[in-house]
Image (cartoon, rainbow, N blue to C red):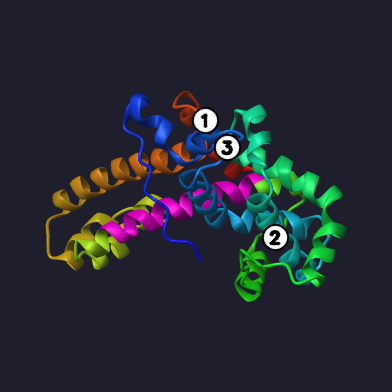
């Protein structure tokens, strides 16, 4: 496994070129170690939407596992970055287009390579993947629409995970446990008082903390999305798309 990728944080428009996707775009046809690490980081974060898409296309559990791993290996081993230059868009869109191409043209070649002992660069936990897939609500969404929805879910999961880690590092894991419902829409009327009692503070202090938490959620969400788009102007558009996908 490669070393952990560098953290690429946007700092306004001037620093945006250092985010994951824009770093990959900038590498163009001459990938660097940094751009490869950025691509690996994005692929590892968003592996499940790919897996779920393949399953919705009618492939078996075993086939979906092989295809997801094979696609990841193919993406890294071959210079797909030359295609990225033409895309100049969002990582989400590029990944789906590349996956469709792979499913249409590369399955036989990937299987032959696997039989020949090709290295697996990405490991899918079949039990975890299938448990998540089983728990997805049944719907008549097309594989493409389901992919968009699962992508949105993954972005929100990553955002929540980052904020949870911040609270844990600050020694406030219990605070996050009680306050998370205000980010997930599960809070109920009158819960401010209950949380205040649980934390040994005032209801007004809880309201202030929730306000700050929601603001922080928005900041982290924008940072996560910035990793997957080519320009700062696309962040707001991608946020709108994300919530639209969740409504369907």
Query: Relative to 162, is 86 on the left or the right?
Result: right
Query: Relative to 230, is 177 on the left or the right?
Result: left
The mark found on residue 30 in the picture is: 3
Is residue 141 visible to us here?
A: no
Q: Secondary structure at mark 3?
A: loop
Dot 3 alpha-carbon crowd within 10 angstroms: few under 14, some 14 to 19, many 20 or more:
few
Camera-side residue of 84 and 61:
84
Camera-side residue of 21 and 216:
21
Q: CA distance from mark 1 to mark 3?
A: 18 Å
Counting from the top left corner in percent of width and height, residue 230 is at 52, 30
The mark found on residue 72 in the picture is: none
Q: First in sequence, mark 2 or 3: give its number.
A: 3
Q: Main secondary structure of the magenta part?
A: helix
Counting from the top left corner in percent of width and height, residue 59 is at 82, 62
Q: Secondary structure at mark 1?
A: loop
Choose top left, top right, bottom left or bottom right for residue 232. Answer: top left
**Is there a contact, CB below 8 Å, between mark 2 and mark 1?**
no
Dot 1 alpha-carbon crowd within 10 angstroms: few under 14, some 14 to 19, many 20 or more:
many
Q: CA distance from mark 2 to mark 3?
A: 25 Å
Q: First in sequence, mark 1 or 3: give its number.
A: 3
Give me the residue at 52% from left, 39% from top: 228
Which numbered disc, 2 or 3, marks the residue closer to the eye?
A: 3
The mark found on residue 68 in the picture is: 2
According to the image, label 1 marks what residue? 230
Q: Which residues are magenta?
A: 148-166
């Amino acid at each position: 496994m490669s070393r952990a990728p560098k953290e690429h944080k946007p700092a306004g428009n001037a620093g945006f070129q250092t985010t994951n996707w824009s770093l990959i775009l900038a590498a163009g046809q001459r990938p660097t170690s940094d751009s490869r690490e950025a691509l690996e980081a994005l692929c590892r974060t968003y592996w499940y939407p790919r897996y779920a898409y393949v399953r919705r296309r009618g492939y078996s559990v075993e086939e979906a596992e092989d295809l997801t791993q094979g696609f990841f290996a193919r993406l890294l081993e071959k210079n797909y970055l030359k295609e990225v230059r033409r895309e100049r868009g969002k990582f989400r869109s590029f990944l789906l287009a590349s996956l469709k191409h792979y499913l249409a043209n590369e399955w036989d070649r990937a299987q032959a390579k696997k039989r020949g002992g090709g290295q697996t660069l990405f490991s899918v936990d079949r039990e975890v993947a299938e448990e998540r897939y089983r728990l997805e609500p049944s719907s008549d969404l097309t594989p493409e629409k389901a992919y968009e929805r699962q992508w949105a879910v993954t972005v929100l999961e990553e955002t929540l995970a980052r904020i949870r880690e911040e609270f844990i590092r600050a020694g406030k894991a219990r605070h996050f446990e009680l306050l998370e419902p205000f980010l997930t829409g599960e809070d109920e009327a009158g819960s401010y008082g209950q949380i205040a009692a649980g934390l040994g503070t005032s209801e007004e202090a809880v309201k202030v903390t929730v306000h700050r938490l929601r603001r922080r959620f928005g900041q982290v969400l924008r940072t996560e999305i910035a990793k997957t788009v080519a320009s700062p102007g696309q962040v707001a558009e991608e946020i709108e798309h994300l919530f639209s996908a969740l409504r369907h």
